[in-house]
């Protein structure tokens, strides 16, 4: 999971600021933007782990 986290952080760093409010994933019927995903993943929350899994399944990571 740490490798997926590192991959996400690398991708996030290259996302233009004006796109960071765009929705990138839906988890448990809720939408999450780049910024929200970053916060959750960076802080190692349970939601962050779910977001990483969803991003991996959808081949974003």
Image (cartoon, rainbow, N blue to C red):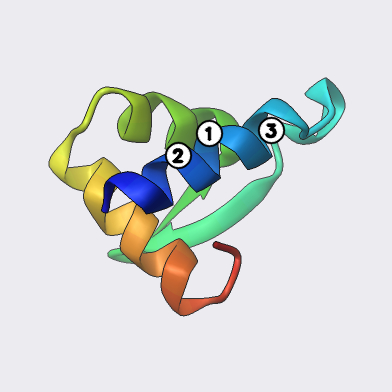
Q: CA distance from mark 1 to mark 3?
A: 16 Å
Please report whichever mark, 2 or 3, sits nearer to the chain's N-terminal start.
2
User: Seen in the image, is 10 located left or right of residue 47?
Assistant: right
Of residues 26 and 57, the one drawn nearer to the viewer in this rendering: 57
Q: Residue 36: x, y in percent?
A: 47, 32
Q: Quadrant of residue 41?
A: top left
Q: Residue at x 32, y 32 (%)?
A: 40
Q: CA distance from mark 2 to mark 3?
A: 20 Å
Q: Residue 52: x, y in percent?
A: 37, 55
Q: Are marks 1 and 2 in contact (CB under 8 Å)?
A: yes
User: Seen in the image, is 26 located left or right of residue 18?
Assistant: left
User: Seen in the image, is 19 located left or right of residue 12?
Assistant: right
Q: Residue 16: x, y in percent?
A: 84, 28
Q: Secondary structure at mark 1?
A: helix
Dot 3 crowding, Cα within 10 Å, few <14, some 14–19, many 20+: few
Q: Quadrant of residue 56?
A: bottom left
Q: Residue 1: x, y in percent?
A: 26, 53
Name the residue carrying label 1.
9
The quarter of the image holding the C terminus is bottom right
Q: Residue at x 29, y 45 (%)?
A: 2
Q: CA distance from mark 1 to mark 2?
A: 5 Å
Dot 1 crowding, Cα within 10 Å, few <14, some 14–19, many 20+: some
Q: Residue at x 26, y 23 (%)?
A: 43
Name the residue carrying label 2.
6
Name the residue carrying label 3.
21
User: Seen in the image, is 46 located left or right of residue 54?
Assistant: left
View extreme (front): residue: 3
């Amino acid at each position: 999971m740490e490798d997926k986290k590192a991959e996400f952080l690398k991708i996030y760093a290259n996302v233009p600021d004006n796109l960071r409010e765009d929705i990138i994933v839906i988890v448990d019927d809720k939408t999450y933007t780049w910024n929200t995903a970053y916060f959750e993943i960076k802080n190692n929350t349970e939601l962050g782990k779910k977001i990483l899994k969803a991003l991996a399944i959808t081949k974003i990571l």
